[in-house]
Image (cartoon, helix red, strand yellow):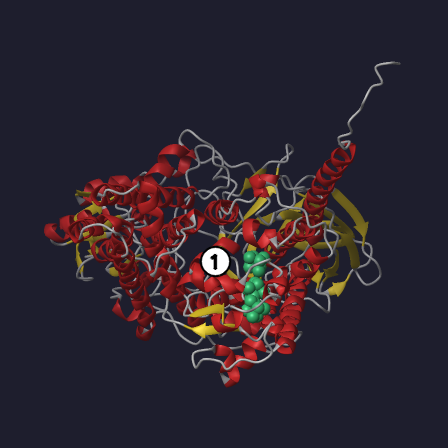
């Protein structure tokens, strides 16, 4: 042990600020405690605040720890992520007081951590993309990991969890080889040492004085405990990845970590989230395989395209590495294993630099905002910050250069490692391109992705598309030619859709000399063939020039991969056949005449006289449903895709329905009731149902944040009773975009003067736009008659599973219900937040005489409905987590007890001697 040493200039411990940060034990201890407290608090917060408003837990784990801090520090300062890791920090003390057993040989396998990371994490991520993204999912995941870590620390010595089990351990050990720092010792001091305090201080039982000679820091996590034990420990700046330029003892798991992590993250992401955003997404082998196998296998809620993108990425990447290295080993006349594991270290930069590029780009686009607002929320205050960059900012491309740096860096490492081989120069040159096969493959994937986008273009909403690209058929409003006049000139004459949103599919025609413009051929066909409107001079937009042309002379491309408007089979018109051919080449489909395209459009409709609708009985309640009940029934058609750009004003469509004696939902073929919309700014407007034949629906736009209320008010006299039926649909729109403002004023529930009878859900004081209803929660509803609270009204709450409870309103017109838990998700639905629907029905009879249009009545029967939904209580998910943890703990404890019991029963060998005389 040495108490003083003259440090070299490149020793970080000798630097003024860095020396303090990396060596001062009080500072390091405070930092580790602070990170551990943050870790525990974020876990607690994830269980305590399960809603999507909790961005704190995800900001801590996915915003700072994983994506940013780890990938930024690994190729720079090395494993300092491990140096402050709460598991490692707490594990040190658990191990100290633990059983200190030697980990069984079968567990001392460094592939365990890599395989857990690749298949246990990334494989699951591609199959169930939303599983770990929520605060609660994150908290559950890290709680389970923590429990496993603590049990292993307790049982086994020398921080075996970090060495063999931690999914991050092998990863950080492998990529830290690229860093420009090195922990070692001053040889001059160590040569006379007889005490070796540095080794006894190391919780990992490592010998820092051997690191230089071995050209490896083995499992060192840069916890810096050894540096406090002896001044001869150094932490120096070196050339980046310098240890890879010399001979080293290869570790198989590290080379496989480079390959498998490159495949499961970089290549899978390029396939799924890169090429998946192009128009060629559907023709890629992973999409085709998913589509094909779906015919034979029920994949449930698995994202099959994600799964097969992952599988193919593994197959291609592993094949590229193995085949290339196999040929290289033959050329070099060397053993395959020796070649593969020795030269495989050149793969190290490929993933990590690409990952830095992605992490930095995401930090400027979203991360900064997510982390800042998340931390503010976690510590009880509100911050509204803008992102540091916007998608499309040119300077963000600078991060893309890091991928090319990665390729160059990998080639340099390969060159240096090939140089170390003792074979002829000619063989080295011949083997080089084969040894570089994985680097070439990585380059190829990047270039192919660029080629795909250039050739096929960005998809308007392809699989894995998380961007905000506009749909192919949309144009900016100022680019759309409007042939029709009047206040509604920007909307389709039939369905009301904004014309610019589907401009490239627009049609126009004259009705009594006046031009009508339609969003698509679907609406044109509806007007002509269903509504029997006489239209002349049919025109269509040329999808190339954006000018209107004679529709009957146009070349239509039918059934392309571009999304259809109001139909499943898209139809785009072109003036020039060559333009149509070019479009077919890029998007598929076939060229047809106007008549053939029109005939196809008619397939979207059934003749109006073939629709049959049940009529509601006079006492049947009408309520709004978010689903068209006819879609599930054979023969009603429907299921049109309304298309629409992502940036247009959101629209809600709902269907007034009633239930028959069998409990089946039925839609209405006609609506005689009055319809009103109360918007977020408290303006009431009368509205109308859809005109198209089939189930009647009501659509409304939601331009502003706040509550929208739709009212269906029907008054009919039957026998001597006036039946007043109100169906209310309340929908909250809150856009979480940067400029979105949460306005408490808009939380209040409202009624309108047009409805004599209404039911409102009272908001509680702590309720915000983020609030969801959960089982176990109490809701209060108030029944209003002519705007005044009504005592004695019958109110019933019924759920989808037919549980119901009836109450009478109190003197304030209020009834209070507890939302019960009557749905328990299956394991296959564990990653989904199950929405349980409920319906509130209020009714009241009143003896009062009157008449409507001279038809007299003697009493009035009022009824009102209010549908809504709630989620399972967060405690349910917590109880899954607790159950899982308890099961895990009991398995481990039982295993340990059996082991201990068996060990005690093994009697020590005792020689028995017999007295032969007896
Ligand atoms: S190996 Fe894993 S548990 Fe150990 S310090 Fe590193 S990240 Fe933490
Ligand atoms: S072997 Fe360890 S304790 Fe001994 S002088 Fe070197 S660094 Fe110090
Ligand atoms: S060698 Fe030093 S820094 Fe590395 S793990 Fe051991 S004590 Fe920590």
Label 1, residues with CA under 10 Å away: few <14, some 14-19, many ≥20: many
Relative depth, front residue between 297 and 834: 297
Q: Percent position (x, y) of residue 849?
A: 75, 54
Q: Quadrant of ligand 3?
A: bottom right
Q: Residue furthest right?
A: 918
Q: Is residue 599 left or right of 63 when viewed as pictured? A: left
Q: Percent position (x, y) of residue 275?
A: 31, 52
Residue at the image point whose x is 36% and y is 71% from the top = 239
Q: Percent position (x, y) of residue 63?
A: 52, 66
Q: Is residue 583 left or right of 499 when viewed as pictured? A: left
Relative depth, front residue between 271 and 214: 214
Instruction: Tell me if residue 364 comes above or below residue 793 in the rendering.
Output: below
Relative depth, front residue between 713 and 117: 117
Q: Residue furthest front?
A: 917
Residue 483 in sight here: yes
Q: Give the secondary structure at mark 1.
A: helix
Q: Percent position (x, y) of residue 793?
A: 79, 53
Residue 532 in sight here: no
Instruction: Tell me if residue 827 comes above or below residue 439 in the rendering.
Output: above
The residue at which mark 1 appears reads as 173
Query: Which image quarter is the C terminus in?
Result: top right
- How many marks are shown on the rendered structure? 1
Query: Which image quarter is the N terminus in?
Result: bottom right
Does the closest atom of ligand 1 sit within 8 Å of the Cβ of label 1? yes
Q: Residue furthest top?
A: 917
Relative depth, front residue between 38 and 635: 38
């Amino acid at each position: 042990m040495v108490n003083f040493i003259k440090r070299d200039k490149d020793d970080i411990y000798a630097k003024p600020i860095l020396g303090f940060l990396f060596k001062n034990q009080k500072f390091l201890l405070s930092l580790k405690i602070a990170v551990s407290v943050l870790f525990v608090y974020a876990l607690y917060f994830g269980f305590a605040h399960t809603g999507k408003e909790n961005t704190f837990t995800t900001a801590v784990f996915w915003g700072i720890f994983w994506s940013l801090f780890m990938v930024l520090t690994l190729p720079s300062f090395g494993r300092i992520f491990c140096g402050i890791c709460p598991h490692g920090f707490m594990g040190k003390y658990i191990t100290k007081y633990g059983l200190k057993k030697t980990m069984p040989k079968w567990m001392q396998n460094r592939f365990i951590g890599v395989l857990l990371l690749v298949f246990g994490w990334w494989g699951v991520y591609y199959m169930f993309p939303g599983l770990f993204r929520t605060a609660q999912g994150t908290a559950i995941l890290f709680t389970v990991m923590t429990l496993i870590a603590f049990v292993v620390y307790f049982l086994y010595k020398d921080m075996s969890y970090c060495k063999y089990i931690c999914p991050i351990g092998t990863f950080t050990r492998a990529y830290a080889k690229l860093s420009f720092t090195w922990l070692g010792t001053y040889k001059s001091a160590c040569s006379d040492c007889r005490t070796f305090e540095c080794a006894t201080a190391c919780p990992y039982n490592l010998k820092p004085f051997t690191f230089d000679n071995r050209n490896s820091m083995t499992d060192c996590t840069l916890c810096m405990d050894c540096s406090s034990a002896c001044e001869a420990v150094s932490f120096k700046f070196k050339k980046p990845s310098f240890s890879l330029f010399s001979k080293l003892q290869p570790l198989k798991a590290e080379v496989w970590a480079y390959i498998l992590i490159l495949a499961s993250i970089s290549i899978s992401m390029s396939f799924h989230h890169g090429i998946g955003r192009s128009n060629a997404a559907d023709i890629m082998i992973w999409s085709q395989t998913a589509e094909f196998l779906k015919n034979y296998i029920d994949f449930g809620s698995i994202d099959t395209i994600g799964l097969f993108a992952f599988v193919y990425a593994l197959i291609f990447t592993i094949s590229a590495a193995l085949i290339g290295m196999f040929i290289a080993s033959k050329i070099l006349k060397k053993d395959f294993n020796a070649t593969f594991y020795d030269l495989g270290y050149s793969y190290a930069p490929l993933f990590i630099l690409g990952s830095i590029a992605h992490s930095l780009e995401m930090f400027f686009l979203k991360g900064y905002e997510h982390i800042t607002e998340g931390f503010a929320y976690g510590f009880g205050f509100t911050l509204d910050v803008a992102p540091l960059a916007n998608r499309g900012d040119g300077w963000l491309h600078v991060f893309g250069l890091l991928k090319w740096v990665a390729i160059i860096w990998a080639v340099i490492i390969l060159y240096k490692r090939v140089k170390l081989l003792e074979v002829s120069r000619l063989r080295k040159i011949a083997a080089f391109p084969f040894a570089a096969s994985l680097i070439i493959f990585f380059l190829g994937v990047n270039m192919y992705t660029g080629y795909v986008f250039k050739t096929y273009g960005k998809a308007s909403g392809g699989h894995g598309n998380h961007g905000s690209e506009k749909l192919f058929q949309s144009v900016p409003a100022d680019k759309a030619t409007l042939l029709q006049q009047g206040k509604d000139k920007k909307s389709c004459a039939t369905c009301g859709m904004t014309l610019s949103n589907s401009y490239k599919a627009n049609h126009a025609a004259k009705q009594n000399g006046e031009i009508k413009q339609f969003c698509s051929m679907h609406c044109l066909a509806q007007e002509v063939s269903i509504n029997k409107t006489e239209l002349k001079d049919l025109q269509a937009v040329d999808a190339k020039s954006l000018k209107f042309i004679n529709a009957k002379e146009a070349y239509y491309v039918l059934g392309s991969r571009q999304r259809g408007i109001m139909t499943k089979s898209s139809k785009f018109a072109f003036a020039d056949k060559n333009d149509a051919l070019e479009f077919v080449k890029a998007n598929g489909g076939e060229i047809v005449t106007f008549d053939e395209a029109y005939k196809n459009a008619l397939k979207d409709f059934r003749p109006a006289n073939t629709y049959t609708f049940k009529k509601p009985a006079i006492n049947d309640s009408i309520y709004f449903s978010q689903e068209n009940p006819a879609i599930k029934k054979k023969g009603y058609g429907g299921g049109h895709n309304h298309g629409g750009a992502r940036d247009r004003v959101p629209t809600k469509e709902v269907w007034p329905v009633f239930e028959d004696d069998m409990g089946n939902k039925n839609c209405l073929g006609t609506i005689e009731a009055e319809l009103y919309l109360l918007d977020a700014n408290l303006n009431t407007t009368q509205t109308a149902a859809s005109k198209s034949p089939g189930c009647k629906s009501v659509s409304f736009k939601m331009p502003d944040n706040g509550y929208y209320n739709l009212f269906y008010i029907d008054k009919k006299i039957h026998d001597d009773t006036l039946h007043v039926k109100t169906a209310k649909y309340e929908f909250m729109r809150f856009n979480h975009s940067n400029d979105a403002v949460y306005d408490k004023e808009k939380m209040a529930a409202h009624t309108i003067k047009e409805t004599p009878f209404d039911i409102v859900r009272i908001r509680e004081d702590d309720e915000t736009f983020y609030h969801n209803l959960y089982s176990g929660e109490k809701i209060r509803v108030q029944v209003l008659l002519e705007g005044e609270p009504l005592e004695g009204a019958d109110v019933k709450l019924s759920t989808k599973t037919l549980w119901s409870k009836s109450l009478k309103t109190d003197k304030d017109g209020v009834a209070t219900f507890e939302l019960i838990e009557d749905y328990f998700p299956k394991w296959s639905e564990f990653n989904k937040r199950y929405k349980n629907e409920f319906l509130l029905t209020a009714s009241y009879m009143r003896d009062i005489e009157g008449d409507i249009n001279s038809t007299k009545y003697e009493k009035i029967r009022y009824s009102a409905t209010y549908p809504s939904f709630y989620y399972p209580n967060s405690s349910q998910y917590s109880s899954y987590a607790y159950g899982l943890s308890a099961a895990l703990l009991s398995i481990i404890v039982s295993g340990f007890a059996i082991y201990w019991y068996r060990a005690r029963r093994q009697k020590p060998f005792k020689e028995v001697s017999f007295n032969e005389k007896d």
